[in-house]
Amino acid sequence: MFRTSTAVLRRTALGATSALALLLTGCGAEVTPDSGGAAAAKTKVKRCGETVEYTVPKRAVVYEGGSADKLFSLGLADKVHGYVMPPANPPVDQSPWAKDYAGVKMLSDDLLNKEIVVEAKSDFVVAGWNSGFSDQRGITPEILDKLGIQSFMHAESCFNYPGFPQKLTPFEGLYSDLDRLGQIFQVERKAEQVVAGLKDRVSAVAGKAPKGGDPVPVFLYDSGTDQPFTAGSQVPPNDIIKTAGGRNIFDGLDQRWTQVTWEAVTQAQPEVIMILDYGDQPAEKKIEFLRKSPHTKNLPAVERNNFFILDYNEGISGPRNIDGLEKFGTYLRELKR
């Protein structure tokens, strides 16, 4: 056994830190070494359009299935302390990551709030802007920053985030989230593999999409009887419909989930109605309403019984968007017009 001088050990440690910093910076993250010269403790990553400095989380709280799925898909279940799952979300035992959910605490079956996060002693919260984070409910990234609690927002919800907007297509937002979460948790290689797999699956569906003629007009029905609630261009169903070879009749609306009129639906004459299936608002009841409503009973989609059911977690931002895409791609390819 030989002895090594303190100066040599220090130079070696600093050299290793510099090499790691260069590697992570190459992956798109800015890394700040800690004062002790150990491996990087902080990583700068975009939260919507804002650059934020993160330390690796150990007690994440996630809101809804999409947030949990993103972390579980990256192999980060051991970093998730608990989840908040409102009634709209289908049972977690139906998830591809059911085993991961089983090992994590369910903190609430209601909406996300600051008290839940503080009580859980969380150091990281994942949710969407205005779908989880909310000025009205007193839980925003700014509020959590002041409490020393890190936060991350789904990119598809960032286009109207006050002060730091960022606009990506929904699928681009999904890929970006996985890349950024990979940087925050320092599992960049895993994130690259997951994103590459999702992109391959998307390309496969796009390559088989019906060619020639006008794309099938599709109406996504979320909810609402007096006025329908539907999907604009800034949510995953828009990309699902477009990639599979259809056309969202409200793709011209630069919004996420939004209210429209039945007159606008009737005028568009959709040939397919995509039903978003909630845990607390089952698709069967929505279809029954559409068959009876004077606004919709004579639509081509209703008369031909062209209903496609999209699971809630296939419609909100998360890896299961691509499951929904593959199913809808198959449906459109088999559709007789």
Image (spheres, grey):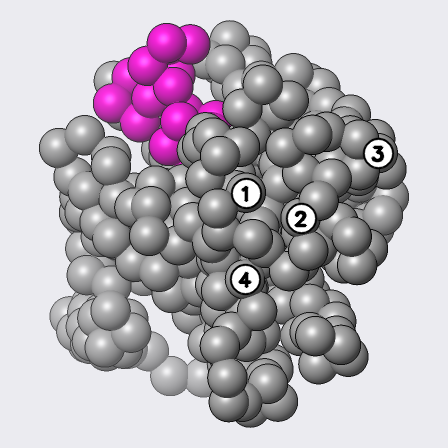
Give SS at disc 2: loop
Which residue is identified by label 4? 217
Q: Which mark is residue 266?
A: 1
**CA separation in Å, label 2 and label 4:** 12 Å
Which residue is identified by label 3? 288
Q: Quadrant of residue 178?
A: bottom left
**CA separation in Å, label 1 and label 4:** 12 Å
| Range shown magenta | 121-144
**CA separation in Å, label 2 and label 1:** 7 Å
Q: Amino acid at mark 4?
A: Pro
Which residue is identified by label 2? 299
Give SS at disc 3: helix
Residue 322 in the image, given as x and y percentages of width and height: 62, 67
Residue 81 or residue 203, whichever sits in front: 203
Q: Is residue 68 left or right of residue 153?
A: right
Q: Amino acid at mark 1?
A: Thr
Residue 57 in the image, given as x and y percentages of width and height: 45, 42
Give SS at disc 4: strand
